[in-house]
Amino acid sequence: MRQESTIAQVGTRTDPQTGAVSPPIYHAATYQHPGFGQSTGYDYTRTANPTRVILEREIAKLEGGTHGFSFSSGMAAVANVLSLLNQNDHLIASDDLYGGTYRIVEQLFRRFGVDASYVDTSDTQAISNAIRPESKAIFIETPTNPMMKISDIREIAQIAREHNLLLIVDNTFMTPYCQQPLALGADIVLHSATKYLSGHNDVLAGLVVTGKPDLAERIAFIQNSVGAVLGPQDCWLTMRGMKTLALRMERQQENALAVATWLTTHKNVRAVYYPGLAEHTGRFVHQQQSNGFGGMLSFTVDSEQRVIQVLEKIAMVIFAESLGGLESMITFPARQTHADIPIEIRERQGITNTLLRMSVGIEHIDDIIADLDQALCDSI
């Protein structure tokens, strides 16, 4: 069955007793034992919940894995995966990670004795050069947030195998509809399901998938021990959103390419970062591992004053920190999503006070461009 059909069928045929097309929501926190030493398979909802189990099976299926796990947020998913590391372990990560991931590594896991090196993971030699005897994992985003750099998942997976490292891929931007890192050799894939998977800005969720039983056992232990699980209502909302993922991604990718192309012609725009543009340095690699370019882009304008002007003048596009919803949204990474990254590191990566990140929605393309045009016009 093609991916579009699998996505549309998320959650169906999961309740044979009634034949409900939409999966039931089990709000129970505790489950009765049939007898002494007996269990229905559900005892306490932190360990397992029937609605959550359906979601976890469905995301595993979409990502081509065998075991899925759902968490109360994308950062809870990241924290649980990073908890696979031990004291004195070393992590290699993309050098322009989402600011929340950088923050949790630097301000939490470093306190627990985990060291980290940040490299340009679009350069596989830089990854190899960063490997130490104590290295245990490589964590990448591709495209990166917000500079849209592309990392070669296949080549990095080969490096990881040669050095017995875990390869963890944050697939939030591309979703399993456009990119399947496990099939390319990754060990773990994770999502902020708040974004494209749920797609409606109405649920906070994180998802993790692996195809390796030993990793699944360790992640399950951490999930149950920490307890940052997704509630049944939010599991259902996430599945409802996932059912339209293919339709939404197609429209958002189409719109994003049109917006990116238009931005390259605007006199007040200095640079545009979108892997669908012919001049994007990672375009060839991206095309080898993905079947679309996604709905995210970033661009720089001609001055800091222009940034303020755009954010104050946009009328339909929403000034907000999140991404991946139906609505077009724009963010100022240096002050919002990446504010916890030291300024010298931010600016070295291109996350300057003139950079804007945009999540392109499903609105009519003419309306999106018209709103951006009036916001970018010369009224400073």
Image: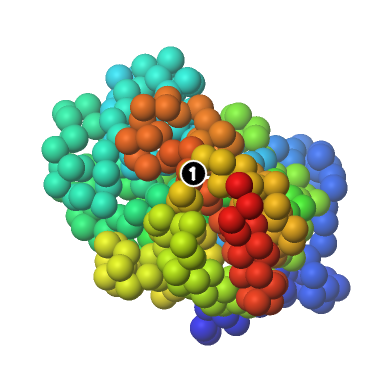
Residue furthest to the bottom: 1
Q: Quadrant of residue 57?
A: bottom right
Closest to the observer: 368 or 215?
A: 368
| Vertical position of residue 215 compared to residue 360: above or below | above
Q: How many marks?
A: 1
Does dot 1 land on a helix, a strand or a loop? Answer: loop
* 332 or 309: nearer the viewer: 309
Could you tell me the amino acid type at mark 1? Answer: Ser
Which residue is rendered at x = 49% and y = 44% of the image?
303
Residue 33, percent across and down?
A: 80, 42
Q: Which residue is mark 1?
A: 303
Q: Position of residue 58 (x, y in %)?
A: 60, 64
Residue 102 on image: x %, y % = 44, 32
Which color scheme is applied?
rainbow
Left/right placement of residue 268 relative to residue 21 reads left
Tell me residue 21's x, y (percent): 79, 75
Res. 68 in view:
no
**Which residue appears at 35% of the width and 40% of the height?**
349
Q: Which one is nearer the viewer's eye here, 25 or 76?
A: 76
Which residue is at a point 83% across and 73% down the rendered structure image?
Answer: 20
Q: Residues within 10 Å of mark 1 (few under 14, many from 20)?
A: some
Determine if residue 2 is in view: yes
Residue at point 62%, 42% (across, down): 308
**Taking 172 as reference, is 364 above or below it?**
below
User: Based on the displayed image, in which of its 4 quarters is residue 7 positioned?
Assistant: bottom right
